[in-house]
Amino acid sequence: MRLRVTAPKTIQQCTIGLPPSKSIANRVLILSALNGIEPTKVLRQPLGDLCDDIRVVAEMLLRDDDTVDVCAAGTAMRFGTAYLAVTAGTRTITGTQRLQERPIGILVDALRSLGATIDYVGKDGFPPLRITGNQALRGGSLTMNGGVSSQFISALLMIAPTMQEGLTLKLEGQLVSTPYLYITMELMRQFGATVEWTDERTIKVAHGYNCNRSADAITIEADWTAASYWYEIASIANLQPSAFHLQSLVMDSIQGDKVCDRIFQLLHEQQTKQEPFVYNFEDCPDLVQTLVVTCCMNAVPFHFTGLRTLRIKETDRISALQTELAKMGFVLEATDDSLAWDGTQTPQQPSFSIATYHDHRMAMAFAPCAIRLGEITIEDPDVVSKSYPTYWSDLEKIGFQLCSIS
């Protein structure tokens, strides 16, 4: 199915109920389960109302199926692998074909070195995995490359208090997405763990959780990455972000993507200058698609770096952005770590639709282009359910017209 998105005649200013933060919710679910708190009591809403990525983690924790299918949820695969390694029983964890192409060997090797029993069902280094849980992993000291997915590191940190010796984790190389590590560590502390940086490269986690929290005391903020699409809409429409009241959005958030507020301020200032907008997205890679599309729509040349993790997301996001923006006449130059546009535009294709590559962020980043183009067609629009199920109905609230095309 495709969805034709037509720009509003007038954008209505209204209140938008953002989804809960995936980053916080998925960590809270794992931490709750490790501390004997039922996930549904933490979420306070039916599983069917949640985005796919949060629902999949909750279902994994609630069910005792022999095979756990996390679908396309990379977070569930990484966090689930560590969680199952310290949970009684033997289970297989798997996902979509794309997820089975995303490497997990570094996490598996780390868990094995700490005493976990994990076997590859298919290709070494990739899901599916057969895991036999051990509720008393040895723990101890471990050295890892800090340039890998921060979710590998977060997965290890959250289970570390269950290990007999706790965990001393030494990180080598360049650290990426460090704000996500700070989220993990802060939430662990809220659940009674002792976790700290002993130096700029070493995290130490003591044995044992000392949790005295009830489910009612646990709150989950609104998602800052979801908020970024409203900043994008405001920017393209030449409105202030305050045009929309984004419910439950915490300005002093523990989420790294709260930096989107500052980035859009910088972008607004840059629009009056001649030189390209330069930014390093190493700590906030999920904002890249939003900002790349916004810059193109606002005719702001850019040079963005810190993108190397984008090649192994839901799709190769660098390649996907190049392909889809080329349909509109924007030719982007790419390396493994950067994307740039010089501000020139060639004629756009006479008729095109935006492929989403099973990637929710492609759909949500490109839909606001309708404001500039009049209308745009998005393929596989239901992909937004991965993180923001009400995205399309929220667009209708402010005046966008939507029409399904078979």
Image (cartoon, helix red, strand yellow):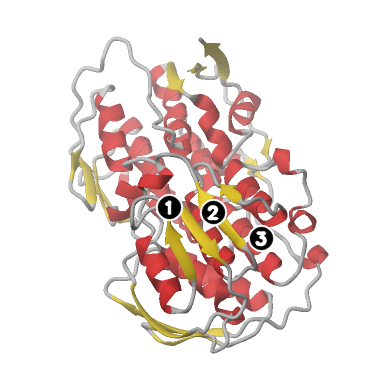
Residue at the (55%, 19%) spot, across then down: 8
Residue 268 visible in the picture? no
139, above or below 177, in the image: below
Earlier residue among tags 3 and 1: 3
Q: Secondary structure at mark 3?
A: helix
204, above or below 67, in the image: below
The residues bearing labels 2 and 3 have C-alpha atoms spaced at a distance of 20 Å
Q: Secondary structure at mark 1?
A: loop
Query: Of the residues shown, which amino acid type is indicated by label 3?
Result: Leu
Q: Which of the 4 quarters of the picture holds residue 192?
A: bottom right
75, above or below 141, in the image: above
Side (left or right) of 350 relative to 83: left
Residue picked out by circle 3: 29
Q: Secondary structure at mark 2?
A: strand
Earlier residue among tags 2 and 3: 3
Earlier residue among tags 2 and 1: 2
117, above or below 394, in the image: below
Of residues 5 and 302, the one drawn nearer to the viewer in this rendering: 5
Q: Are marks 2 and 1 in contact (CB under 8 Å)?
A: yes
Residue picked out by circle 2: 92
Residue 393 visible in the picture? yes
**Residue 121's disc number:** 1
Mark closer to the observer (2, 3): 2
